[in-house]
Amino acid sequence: MPLETPLTFLTRLAQAVTSRGLGRALRFKYFMVMEVAGWFSATGLWFHRTAVGWVTWEMTGSGAWLGIIVAAEAFPAIFLTPIAGAFADRYDRLTMGRWAQLAMTGNATLLAALTLLGLLNVYVLLVIMLIQGVITAFWTPVRLAIVPSLVPRAELSAAIALHSVLFNVARFAGPAMAGGIIAVWGAAPAFVFNAVGYAVFLAALMYIRLLYPEPLSGVRQSLYRDFLEGLIYVFRHRGLRPFFAYMIVFEVLMRALIELFPGFTDDIFHRGPEGLGILLSASGLGAICASFSVGTFAKPQNITLVMVVAILASIGFQIAFALTDVFWLAVFFSAALGAMISAHGISGQIIVQTTVQGSMRGR
């Protein structure tokens, strides 16, 4: 039997990966390009998040400042994301995504430059994170609305789950690498890597095309009316109304703990940035396992049950993490909490993306 050439082997491997399970979504070229570039960008994002947390703690030694910096990025989303969603339902989503990525690249480059020049302080960082929050508020609904236009509807669940798997692989690898880099060279290289990641993703967005475009609402009424229409749609939808209320409770009560990891790492466990990287990577590893499991094995009729189990288990793991002062036990609880947060998030995405009509997707 003749030996396979490397090209033949790689072709056969690619066919095997894309023929079943979550890999089915990779058969669609533009989705594959977006996800590969998105993985690189997400790795940079976790470099950025690890570095921001550690730099904030180094500069202030304050848990309050850790919360303020995270809130600075999240606060604009509360008010701007619904408006941005209305824009995403009116105008070309790919064009909006490209402009958002260009702005993210510029903001990340500014942060890297200020850090390299020694001009970064906590107040400057606060302003940069506020700007980042504004940009992210416009990018998030566009990113979520683009994916259904890259794959057929029958493959949408696989695409959502695969996206989560790749994001969480980055969430595992990024902090682990960033912790070591920050310990040796400081935060600047982590910020530089993030800027490069955004630039790569921007290049991918310039290349891709929407193969399955959805009808947009268009500019047929005022932006206020579009925004109000989205609210009415949610409140009148029997499934989405309780779902969004449930999501708000989960996000407020569960995700904040991870943002305080720099303080736990230094104050409770007495570890450096490497310890922070380990805790964040453990959370990412748990999320990878949950992403793969939900995407591969969860049946559509069981998705709501998965969400309920995830939030109940999250409560227990969060309490356990808060009570322990043993680092490796905390690593385990971080992994378990990451798994539950991911299972909850993927289930929610599947429910929303397969329920809403296309012209309402951004909102």
Image: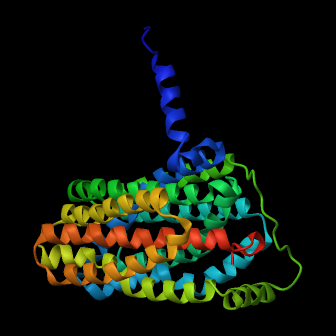
Horizontal and vertical percent position of residue 200: 54, 49
Left or right side of 186 for 221: right
- Which corner quadrant of the image does residue 183 belong to? bottom left
Image quadrant holding the C terminus, namely bottom right
User: Can residue 307 be spotted in the picture?
Assistant: yes
**Nearest the eye: 21 or 192:** 21
Horizontal and vertical percent position of residue 263: 22, 78
**Nearest the eye: 313 or 129:** 313
Label count reads 0
User: Can residue 47 be spotted in the picture?
Assistant: no
Left or right side of 23 for 223: right
- Which corner quadrant of the image does residue 121 belong to? bottom left
Q: Relative to 202, say whether 136 is above or below.
A: below
Which residue is painted at 50% across and 54% down in the image? Answer: 162
Q: Residue furthest right?
A: 220
How did the renderer colour the structure? rainbow
